[in-house]
Image: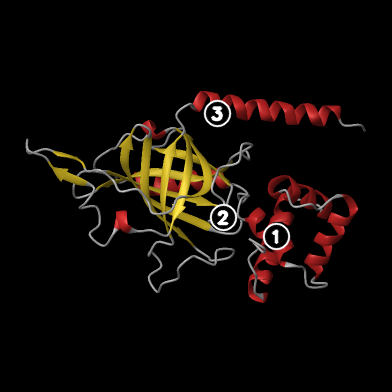
Amino acid sequence: MADRYVHYSDEERERLRAALQEYSTAMKLSAQALADDITRKTQFPLDLDAGRKRVERFFQGRHRQPDDFIDALARYLGSVPPPLIEQSAATLAHFFTRSIKRAERIDGLIGRYRVYASTDRRAHGHDGFREVMQLNQWGEFSAAPMKPMISRVPYAVIEMKPMPKSEALLVSEAIINFSVDPEIEEFPEDLPREAEAGVIVAFGHSDRDVPRYFMATRTVLETRLYRLYKVADDPLTLRGELNFNGGIGRPSSLTHSNPLHPDYEVELVRIEDAAQDEAEHEAGDSAAQQDEVDLPP
């Protein structure tokens, strides 16, 4: 693919400029620190003094920066959580769980998941959840075989962790394919560390008694809303729909007059060897810390 970068309009550039300035002010990041953090999280080279000057020029609106630089900013803002995200997650969890009539245990979802996205909506059509469960010969409902998504684009890695004093789970998220680029077919070996981003709560049951869940995550750039239901146990798999509050960086996203019409179908597959995955993360963190220690003054 000769040009994998999205072409950003003037309006989108201004939105990104304002969001980046607000974030850097809130986090008290200098232009140099911001350039370094963008490089760490996106692998886009903004090295040393040249990177600082490039960020400063963008803030000042001097020159029209190329799309690859703007794309890096969009990916960065689409991955970093806003300040006080954990307090916001706790508030949202309380809002959705305080009036639950039928408690649904949610701690069984704890773990790390790979998230795939697709524009295929066949498995979640206009009939709602009626195809999820079927009546067997003994008069019991059982899970019907789920058709695979036509396309499965690697999108993110998330981790669901306990949230104290709440019937909800705290969600951490690492976006590895912000633009949902179908050219990306595999998850990277070195995954970025997840950042706390939102919450998942039980959200009742379908008309065939299938547990449903609502997940909301937030970054500086956008809010992501997931409506999920369980489709498999081995490995634990959730299927559902994903909506964004904006279309920056995703030319294949569909826009509709109905704000709840899904942008993508999604599938969350829990990573089976979670302990090994966590060990790899910790080893990566230790190596990064050692690199910092070994750096010359």
Earlier sequence position, callout 3 versus callout 2: 2
Number of marks in picture: 3
Residue at 68% from the left image edge and 70% from the top image edge: 13
Cα separation between marks 1 and 2: 27 Å
The residue where tag 1 is placed is: 20
Asked which secondary structure carries label 2, the reply is loop
- Residue 47 position (above or below residue 163): below
Q: Looking at the image, tell me whether mark 1 or mark 2 is earlier in sequence order.
A: 1
Single out the mark in the foreground, 1 or 3: 3
Q: Amino acid at mark 2?
A: Glu
Amino acid on which disc 1 is placed: Leu
Kindly indicate the quadrant of the structure image that contains residue 134: top left
Query: Disc 1 on helix, strand or loop?
Result: helix
Residue 297: image x %, image y %?
Answer: 93, 33
Sequence order check, earlier mark of 1 and 3? 1
Question: What residue sits 65% from the left and 59% below the top?
Answer: 74
48 up-or-down from 59: above or below = above
Rendered image: mark on residue 144: none
Q: Is residue 290 visible?
A: yes
Q: Is residue 143 left or right of residue 12?
A: left
In screen coordinates, is 118 left or right of 191? Answer: left
- Classify 10 Å Cα crowding around label 1: few (below 14), some (14-19), many (20 and above): many
> Would residue 133 appear left or right of 68 to someone viewing this image?
left
Judging by the rendered image, the residue that carries numbered circle 3 is 277
Q: Is residue 83 above or below residue 244?
A: above
Q: Which mark is residue 183?
A: 2
| Mark toward the viewer: 1 or 2 | 2
Amino acid bearing label 3: Asp
Task: From the top left corner, tell me how far across and down residue 33 is, in percent.
Answer: 80, 49
Observer able to see residue 29: no
